[in-house]
Image (tube, helix red, strand yellow):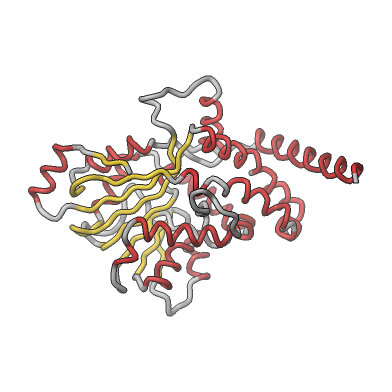
């Protein structure tokens, strides 16, 4: 028994060492929106991310306090919890939704299938659009287009709901992103955003170990910068398009198990990297150090999982009041 434990521990250490070596030698820093598109094109084409993360390329929801859940089911539950938190489950079938940063369309399909919404998903990755179209039944009200989140191709006031999950960290111009999300929303429409955020360093600057960790989190997954929950809320208000207040919440606790669960998938489902051979194995272990750093960052308070809900103003007087008030409510 002891010999087996030693052998297993040795294997884990060797795999981790390989992952760290590949990780350090193959950073993917943000260079331009095209570099983000290229990264997602590659991840989509090789199929490994989809095999392990399923159709939902985002974190899961495990409750508060977190409960043990199936990894893939937790991801679908995240979409349902976000829809409930944003009040979308009170909207009628046929509601038009724009899913900004839709990935391969998991959230779009769930919103169309379970709520009867008419969903348009957009991503900067042509390969994600192709894969989303392949996975979507013809009779489902969900379609997918290539679009830049900083310059959406839709007219003003096009959608009843604008929805976005874990897209903001890839966006270099956060102000343009905030403006576009609200610009294409109809007056009275609902904006719901879920994003990785860093702690507000205006209140508490990053310390000696947090700075290099944040640098790695940015460079390894093509992120130009993380907003804080507070700063992105302020950007939404500063558009002058928000009615009343921006509602925010911190979902770090219910999403935190996702990071270790995502690594554990490679252990309990080795057929994934076995299917893709040595290249698949190398690509899989290459992501382990970043996921461990993400777990460290979110667990230690360096990063936070932010939720945002805003309503677009319906009249000029509301626009003026909101623009001058600059009020943000945190719940």
Residue farthest to the front, as pictured: 65
Tell me how many marks there are: 0
In the visual, does 24 lie left or right of 28? Answer: right
Which of 25 and 251 lies nearest the eye of the viewer?
251
Which of 272 and 248 lies nearest the eye of the viewer?
248
Quarter-wise, where is residue 227 in the image? top left
Residue 46, horizontal then vertical, whole percent: 63, 57
Residue 277, horizontal then vertical, whole percent: 76, 55
Quadrant assignment for the C terminus: top left
Taking the spot 49% from the left edge, 60% from the top edge, the residue there is: 77
Residue farthest to the bottom, as pictured: 139
Taking the spot 50% from the left edge, 54% from the top edge, the residue there is: 61
Taking the spot 54% from the left edge, 45% from the top edge, the residue there is: 256
Residue 176, horizontal then vertical, whole percent: 30, 43
In the visual, does 108 lie left or right of 312? Answer: right
In the visual, does 234 lie left or right of 168? Answer: left
Residue farthest to the top, as pictured: 208
Taking the spot 49% from the left edge, 21% from the top edge, the residue there is: 207
| Rendered position, 28 above or below 134 | above
């Amino acid at each position: 028994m002891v010999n087996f434990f030693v052998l297993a521990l040795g294997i884990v250490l060797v795999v981790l060492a390989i992952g760290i070596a590949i990780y350090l030698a193959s950073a993917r820093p943000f260079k331009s929106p095209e570099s983000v598109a290229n990264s997602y094109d590659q991840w989509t084409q090789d199929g490994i991310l989809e095999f392990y993360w399923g159709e939902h390329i985002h974190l899961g929801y495990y409750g508060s306090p977190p409960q043990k859940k199936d990894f893939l089911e937790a991801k679908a539950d995240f979409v349902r919890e976000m829809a409930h938190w944003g009040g979308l489950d009170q909207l009628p079938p046929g509601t038009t939704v724009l899913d900004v940063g839709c990935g391969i369309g998991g959230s779009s399909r769930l919103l169309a299938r379970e709520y009867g919404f008419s969903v348009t998903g957009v991503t900067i990755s042509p390969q994600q659009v192709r894969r989303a179209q392949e996975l979507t039944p013809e009779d489902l009200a969900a379609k997918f287009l290539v679009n830049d989140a900083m310059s959406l191709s839709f007219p003003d006031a096009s959608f009843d709901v604008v929805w976005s999950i874990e897209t903001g960290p890839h966006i270099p111009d956060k102000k343009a992103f905030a403006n576009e999300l609200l610009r294409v929303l109809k007056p009275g429409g609902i904006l719901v955003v879920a994003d990785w955020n860093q702690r507000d360093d205006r209140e508490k600057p990053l310390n000696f170990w947090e700075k290099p960790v944040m640098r790695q989190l940015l460079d390894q997954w093509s992120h130009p910068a993380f907003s804080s929950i507070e700063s992105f809320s302020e950007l939404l208000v500063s558009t002058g398009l928000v009615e009343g207040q921006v509602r925010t919440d911190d979902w770090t606790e219910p999403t935190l198990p996702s990071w270790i669960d995502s690594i554990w998938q490679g252990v309990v489902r080795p057929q994934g990297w076995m299917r893709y051979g040595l290249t698949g194995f190398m690509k899989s272990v290459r992501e382990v150090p970043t996921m461990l750093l993400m777990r460290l960052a979110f667990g230690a308070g360096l990063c936070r999982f932010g939720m945002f809900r805003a309503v677009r103003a319906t009249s000029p007087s509301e626009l003026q009041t909101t623009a001058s008030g600059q009020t943000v409510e945190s719940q």
